[in-house]
Image (spheres, rainbow, N blue to C red):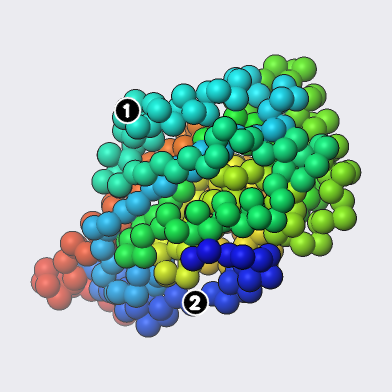
Amino acid sequence: MIFSTLDELRAACRDLPAGDEAAAAEATARQGQLTKPPGSLGRLEDLAIWLARWQGRAIPRLDRIGIVVFAGNHGIAARGVSAFPIEVTAQMVANYAAGGAAINRLAEAAGAALSVVSLDLDVPTADFTRAPAMDDAAFLAAVSAGYRAVAPDLDLFAVGEMGIGNTTAAAALCAALLGGGGSRWVGRGTGVDDAGLVRKREAVDAGLARHAGRVADPLAVAAALGGRELAAMLGATLAARRHRIPMLLDGFVATAAVLPLARLAADGLAHCRAAHVSAEPGHKAVLSALGLTPLLDLGMRLGEGTGAATAMLLARAAIACHAGMATFAEAGVAEKAV
């Protein structure tokens, strides 16, 4: 799909299919028949039921899992908000292609197909303290690229990102859409020193001041303060919902990227689960604002989709039990006395 106007995209964000409640009810009933005390597998049971709801089958499958990493460059990086130069974005994309990154190994472990989409790396977005990061056309092009990157027949999906400066953009989006300034949302990202942390906070506050007139429109905010890879992650998350694909959200940047969808539709992220909580301090706050409880807390802060890929192993554990365990009747085991 190609979105031509913000109004067209806004309408798509509000016209969202629901999950299959009949499949979820069947999955719930099956959980009650398996040879275990009710609820004894905890959130693994919830995962199985959630997958059933969005796959539309009482016994979900994980035959086709996809991860897409989007890469973009940020003009705000010129303000010294990252410990690494902007050239690292393209270098890491080459590393993904060579199979040398953490996401390559974790995707392989999860049985997920990995793809990488580079978004005009030679043309960084504008410095959002001076101008909108993207005009409407650039923003919509990135959203559309993300939407088109999602195969419609996936059983489970996640996005990752690579972009020097993108934790600054993510912090700015959170501040604009959830309130608070740079001091609330800015963390050390790639490992900036104290002076770099001050520069990041000042950049976020300057961006908020310049684009204060846009805060009533989540999409206009995303264009003004975000980046191409964040816009693409928004488009991919929208595509997953419209294809009814369950999705695991990765870290701080990925979660900030989908805030506009949550703001435009109260249940916009119903097809999503939070894979983990990042060590980046703003991530816990944005998950709390969205009412999302992370599956893992491992102190990760790499991005790339690595937290989501790790949580996919939990999804496989959930389905192994849900699909493979015997029922009380099949095993000849007495059920709990009434």
State whether residue 162 is above or below residue 36: above
Judging from the image, what secondary structure is the residue with disc 1 in? helix
Tag 1: residue type? Ala
| In the image, farthest residue toward the bottom | 22
Q: Within 10 Å of the Cα at label 1, are there few (<14), some (14-19), or many (20+) other Cα atoms?
A: few
Query: Which numbered dot is residue 282?
Result: none
Q: Is residue 125 above or below residue 45?
A: above
Q: In this view, does 103 lie above or below 236?
A: above
Please give the name of the residue rendered at 83% of the width and 37% of the height, measured from the top-left corner: 130
Looking at the picture, tell me which residue is in the foreground, 49 or 196.
Answer: 196
Relative depth, front residue between 222 and 181 = 222
Going by the numbered disc 2, the residue's amino acid type is Pro
Q: Which residue is rendered at x = 42% and y = 80% of the image? A: 21
Q: In this view, does 15 lie to the left or right of 182?
A: left
| Residue 24 x/y as whole percent | 38, 75
Give the mark, 1 or 2, whose residue is nearer the N terminus.
2
Q: Name the residue under label 2.
A: 17
Q: Do the residues labelled 1 and 2 touch (CB within 8 Å)?
A: no
Q: Which of the two discs, 1 and 2, sits closer to the camera?
A: 1
At x 26%, y 70%, the residue is 59
Rendered residue at 55%/39% (across/down): 120
- In the displayed structure image, the side of residue 316 where residue 121 appears, left or right: right
